[in-house]
């Protein structure tokens, strides 16, 4: 058992849980989430943007969790976290207790780490063709 792959698995699980939870809330209105229409209204964006963020978070979280196309999924999460920081959290400062960007920045950095390192050996991505494994 590779320690690095085990560590990447734990990091992927921790990150994916948050993205699956929030993505379900944005996309489906699950767990008391806003759904795509209300989410779009909260960020003063188009409804299609709500669907895109919800799909990105949900499918990106699934890709990170399973390690399938994990680099693409993580890159998508990094973009979404930049959006969350700039559009929602930045005006509130760093402190998450005040609505700040602390957690979004943490998820951004985790996503970048997955982009750089890949999902590790303990992923379903290892079952893909060698060309797809690099994604």
Image (spheres, grey):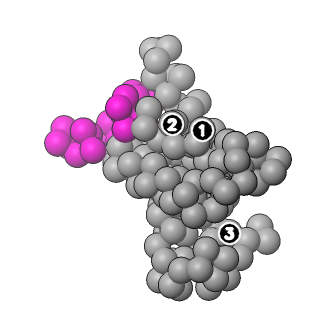
Residue 54 seen from this side: yes
Q: Assign a secondary structure to mark 1.
A: helix
Q: Nearer the viewer, residue 115 or 42?
A: 42
User: Was residue 36 drawn as part of the magenta stretch in this picture?
Assistant: no
Tell me: residue 6, above or below residue 23.
above
Residue matched to label 2:
109
As measured in the structure, the alpha-carbon distance from the residue carrying label 2 to the one carrying label 1 is 5 Å
Which quadrant would residue 114 be assigned to in this image? top left
Residue drawn at the location 27% of the way across and 44% of the way down = 135
Residue contact between numbered discs 2 and 1, judged by CB atoms under 8 Å: yes
Report x, y in % for residue 89. 66, 56
Magenta stretch in the rendered image: 114-135
Which quadrant would residue 103 be assigned to in this image? top right
Tell me: residue 29, above or below residue 88.
below
Q: Nearer the viewer, residue 135 or 128?
A: 135
Tell me: residue 38, above or below residue 15.
below
As measured in the structure, the alpha-carbon distance from the residue carrying label 1 to the one carrying label 3 is 20 Å
Q: Label 2 crowding class (10 Å Cα cut-off): few <14, some 14-19, many 20+?
A: some
Which quadrant would residue 27 be assigned to in this image? bottom right
Report x, y in % for residue 4. 46, 18
Report x, y in % for residue 107. 57, 43
Q: Assign a secondary structure to mark 3.
A: helix
Residue matched to label 3:
25
Residue contact between numbered discs 2 and 3, judged by CB atoms under 8 Å: no
Residue matched to label 1:
106
Nearer the observer: mark 2 or 3; the answer is: 2
């Amino acid at each position: 058992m590779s320690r690095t792959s085990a560590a990447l698995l734990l990091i992927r699980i921790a990150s994916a849980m948050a993205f699956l939870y929030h993505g379900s809330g944005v996309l489906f209105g699950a767990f008391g989430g806003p759904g795509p229409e209300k989410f779009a209204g909260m960020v003063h964006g188009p409804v299609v943007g709500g669907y895109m963020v919800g799909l990105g978070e949900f499918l990106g979280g699934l890709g990170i969790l399973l390690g399938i196309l994990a680099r693409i999924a993580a890159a998508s999460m990094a973009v979404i976290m930049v959006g969350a920081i700039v559009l929602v959290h930045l005006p509130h400062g760093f402190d998450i207790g005040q609505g700040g960007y602390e957690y979004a920045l943490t998820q951004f950095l985790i996503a970048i780490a997955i982009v750089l390192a890949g999902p590790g050996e303990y992923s379903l991505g290892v079952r893909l063709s060698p060309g797809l494994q690099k994604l």
